[in-house]
Image: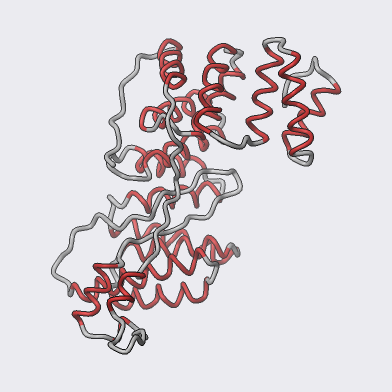
Amino acid sequence: MRAKSIKLMPRGSNALNHSFMMAAMMTSRNSCQFNYQKIFSQTYKRLSTANGQMAIDPIAMSKRTVLVTALVGLLLTGCQSTPTNDLTNIAAYQTSTRPNDNRNLDQQEIARVRTSLAAQYIRKNELDTAQRQLEKAFAADSRYAPAYDMMGVLLQQEGSRLNLEKADQYFKKAIALDKDFEQAHNNYGVYLSQMKRYREAAEQFEIAGSALGYEGRIGALENLGRTYLQLGDRSAAAKAFLRALDGNRNSIIAHIELVDLLLEQQRVPQAQRLYETLILVQGQGISPRLLLQGIKLAAAQNNITTRQQLAQQLLSAYPLSDEAKQLKTWLNNPEAPWK
């Protein structure tokens, strides 16, 4: 689905008010940032032998079989690990935008298949097997950008100091091979944020978030907003979240973060309208953070009944959560500001 273009808004609080009111008026179904797809299921069926036996290794087959395998089962799906500062994850993994050149297409398809298999193994945390698949992808096509990006994801997920250091070079290599590979920019931004290199991360998220047509663009903008929060730049964060809402009115993360930003500014009516929209977008189930936001809004409007109901729900459903601890601290000293 083509991403919506970004609307230019006037400067100042009027623009913010307009965007919040527009967001509050829009309700529709939830969107999912992760849309994993099963790889090769149809391909293996086609490769069955006459007596029902399954072919062992598609790479060892003829060139024609390799091409069929690649064309049928080729959607790369990947998973970038979630860093400690809770940035959002990437959408369904996308291949490089680099056009085909004169290299042997069979080898390029092999690299794609091997990278796709590696993504599946990474999601199952079978990292050694994933690494072997990526080495085969490099052997088939040493300039295949998604393989380098996926190796960066793998090393980041393993998480040791040495592998985290190595991951940086693989992300850089993927981007050097294809500067328009938005998925690599977003993944590199998540990595940089995990390493607390927030300004560098913001640069990568801005590139991915500005790429119209990139399926993970909204997630990149959400990541951008949260990165600015880490940097203490509330104004830049609000602008990033508003851009995310402009592209997807169902962005739960943008709604949640903007409610908190409005509460910080004591703009209670706007925060209440956005919160009500957020509850509709969220659907069934409510997180401890949403409950705490509802408590804050009820307290700010002196709605004692609602505040007590939500407080009881938070303490009973999530007694060990950070939000429950904040609530208990505030209940002991209602005059103190929320921390």
Indicate the position of residue 270 as horizontal and vertical percent values.
53, 14
Number of numbered callouts drawn: 0
Residue 314 is left or right of residue 49, and the answer is right
The outermost residue toward the left is 102
Decide if residue 175 is in sight here: yes
Q: Is residue 158 above or below residue 335?
A: below
Q: Is residue 233 visible?
A: no
User: Where residue 290 sits in the image (x, y, percent)?
Assistant: 63, 30
Q: State left or right for residue 294 relative to residue 328.
A: left
Where is residue 169 drawn, in percent x and y?
43, 61
Q: Quadrant of the C terminus?
A: top right
Q: Residue furthest front?
A: 51
Above or below residue 291? Residue 169 is: below
Quarter of the picture containing the N terminus is top left
Quarter-of-image position of residue 335: top right
Q: Is residue 310 left or right of residue 192?
A: right
Residue 202 to residue 39: above or below = above
Residue at horizontal 49 percent and vertical 64 percent from the top: 154
How has the structure been colored for display? Answer: secondary structure
Residue, x 46% and y 73% (percent of image)?
Answer: 131
Q: Residue at x 58, y 44 (%)?
A: 86
Q: Residue at point 31% right, 28% down?
A: 6
Asked if residue 338 is positioned above or below residue 319 in the image, the reply reads: above
In this view, the residue in front, 144 or 280, is 280
